[in-house]
Image (spheres, rainbow, N blue to C red):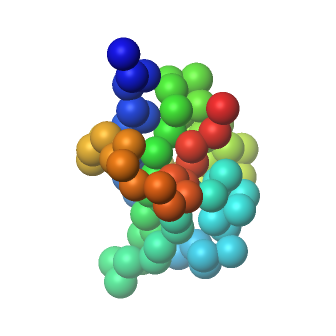
Amino acid sequence: MTAPQPPIYEIRVAGRLSSNWDAWFDGLSVTSDADGTSVIRGSVVDQAALHGLLQKLRDVGLVLESLTQVGIADPTDHHHQPGATS
C-alpha cells in the first residue's frame, strides 16, 4: 500500500513578491501576476505544514487573498516537488 500523495495548494497574497521568496517558502514556487497579487504554489505534506506556511505569511504581514487546493502531487514525477518536506 502506498502513502497518500500530498495536496498541491495555490495561495494568493496581495502584493508582488519576487521569485527570491522561493527559498523562504521552503521551495514553493512564487510568481507575480499583473493584477498586483502573487501566487505561492506547491505541495504541502500535511495540515500542520499548511498552518505553518500560513503563519509565515502572517508573520511578514502578507495579506491572504485566497487559498485553494488545486490537485494532488504526482507520485511518478521524479523532479523536485516544491514544498515537499518531512
Location of residue 83 in the rendering, given as x and y in whole percent from the top left corner: 57, 48
User: Which residue is depicted at the point 50% across and 24% down?
Assistant: 47
Residue at screen point 72% across, 58% down: 24
Residue 9: x %, y % from top left: 39, 46
Residue 49, image x, y percentages: 59, 31
Q: Which of 64 and 67 is in front in this view?
A: 67
* Residue projecting furthest to the front: 1
Can you tell which quarter of the image residue 7 is in? top left
Residue closer to the observer: 3 or 86: 3
Could one spot residue 35 in this view of the protein?
A: yes
Residue 26 lies, in percent from the top left, at: 67, 52
Above or below — where is 86 with respect to 19?
Answer: above
Compared across the picture, whether 41 is left or right of 24 comes to: left
Q: Is residue 58 visible?
A: no
Q: Farthest residue to the top: give it.
A: 1
Compare residues 53 and 64 and report the one nearer the observer: 53
Residue found at x 31% / y 41%: 72
**Which residue: 52% across, 32% down?**
45
Q: In which quarter of the image is the C terminus?
A: top right
Locate residue 5 relative to residue 83 in the image: left or right. left
